[in-house]
Image (cartoon, rainbow, N blue to C red):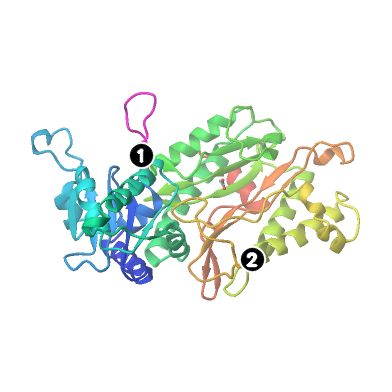
Amino acid sequence: MNINEYKNRRQELMDILSEGSMAILPAAPMQLRNCDVHYPYRQDSNFYYLTGFPEPQALAVIVPQREQGQYLLFCREKNQNKEALDGNIIGLEDACEIYGADDAFPITDIDDIIPGLMESCRCLYYPMGYYEEFDDKIIEWINQLREHVRSGKVAPFEMVSVDHILHEMRLQKTDAEIQALRAAADVSILAHKRAMQFCRPDLYEYELEAEITYELLRNGCRAEAFPTSVAGGKNACILHYTENKDILNNGDLVLIDAGAEINHYASDISRTFPVNGHFSKPQKTLYELVLKAQRAAIGKIYPGNQWNDPYNAAIVVITEGLKDLGLLVGKVDILIEEEAYKRFYTDHIGHWLGMDVHDPGNYKIDDVWRYLEPGMVMTVEPGLYIPAAEDISEEWWNIGIRIEDNVLITVGGHEVLTSELPKTVIEIEALMARKAF
Ligand code: GLY
């Protein structure tokens, strides 16, 4: 992403910060496995959003009133004697030249420099409660200043959690972010298509997962946005199923929930398709009901509508459909009021999507469902999960279906970023018939 993108974000944050304040954000800590290898490392999304800086052991400090430069980056130094070993370390010079810091300092100098910067600030913005070590450090610096109060030092007396501000900023995607989300969606589509074309009875769920991972990796995706779920048959009724260990039986459906992360932006797609390439009549009936609900939900996505409008549209379709099939009995409006559909449709409609798969941002403001605005991106993922129960006709037992797309809210309505992936019964069966692997 262009360096100006990050600069604009820092400026937007500075415009929001109160007078006489500063903001401090830490990079994500390194993760150690049960050996001393730091792997895999994923930068903290808020930190990355403001800096584009990919390394651990870094701290971004933003001081709007600092005349010598408002954006300071503390990071690892290149060691000239060990160039071969730490050649990948960005170092102080490039922190300024490539990543746009006004000043860069060694991370080892934070205790010497930061209390001095805090001294001139009345209000400190930082992400509270995310990283224990960093929280402790902030308290340590503040106490250090308090100890010297008689020599005229003043500690910030107001602490504000910066994440709320950043989360609101992150909700509205810029053109560059939308481009990144498109890239993640495009690669994810390829992976789902591959799984559909590779699928056949008697494979194991993990074999389809392997095809997904293969297609993601060969298209430049270094990390999945979340653990891939390949759920055959009744496993599709298990929430967040990721064991992917069972055999895929002839006659069952398989539900795949998978998405790429590309350049720190996520995609999140679910598709459900028949293991043998052909929907049975009950599977097709329920599938088309979920699809109708998803289309009704997507139809409600436009600026000025509220977050819950798509959900409400979906539950009307689902409830009417379940009633027509005899799976619910009663009047539709009463069934909706009593939330009878929740026996079969347990989730909400979706979530915000962005740098994180469950991107931050409130869904309600002052107890009112949030209004949709251009630039927001959300998933739309209604589903039906039918348990094996005595009061349910056996033809429906253990059918689990979810259809999930990624939707950008535009000025004129919406755009489905994942629309290239087959979704109708005819499209899915046609793609599966063209076995490519
Ligand atoms: N599709 C993954 C998740 O929403 O958790």
Q: CA distance from mark 2 to mark 1?
A: 37 Å
Q: Are marks 2 and 1 in contact (CB under 8 Å)?
A: no
Q: Quadrant of residue 98?
A: bottom left
Q: Name the kind of residue labelled 2 in the image.
A: Asp
Query: Can the viewer see residue 73 in this picture?
Result: no
Q: Nearer the viewer, residue 291 or 432?
A: 291
Identity of the residue drawn at 57% across and 69% down: 372
The disc at residue 186 is none
Highlighted magenta segment, given as a residue range: 31-42
Left or right: 4 in relation to 262: left
Dot 1: element: loop
Q: In the displayed structure, would residue 375 be above or below residue 163?
A: below
Mark nearer the viewer, 2 or 1: 2
Asked if the magenta segment contains residue 296, the reply would be: no
Q: Quadrant of residue 398?
A: top right
Q: Nearer the viewer, residue 59 or 136?
A: 136
What secondary structure predominates along the stretch shown in magenta? loop
Q: Nearer the viewer, residue 287 or 404?
A: 404
What residue is shown with label 2? 367
Query: Which badge, 2 or 1, comes first in the chain's sequence?
Result: 1
The disc at residue 41 is 1
Q: Name the kind of residue labelled 1 in the image.
A: Tyr
Identity of the residue drawn at 53% across and 56% down: 418
Question: Residue 256 at what x, y percent from top left?
Answer: 59, 42
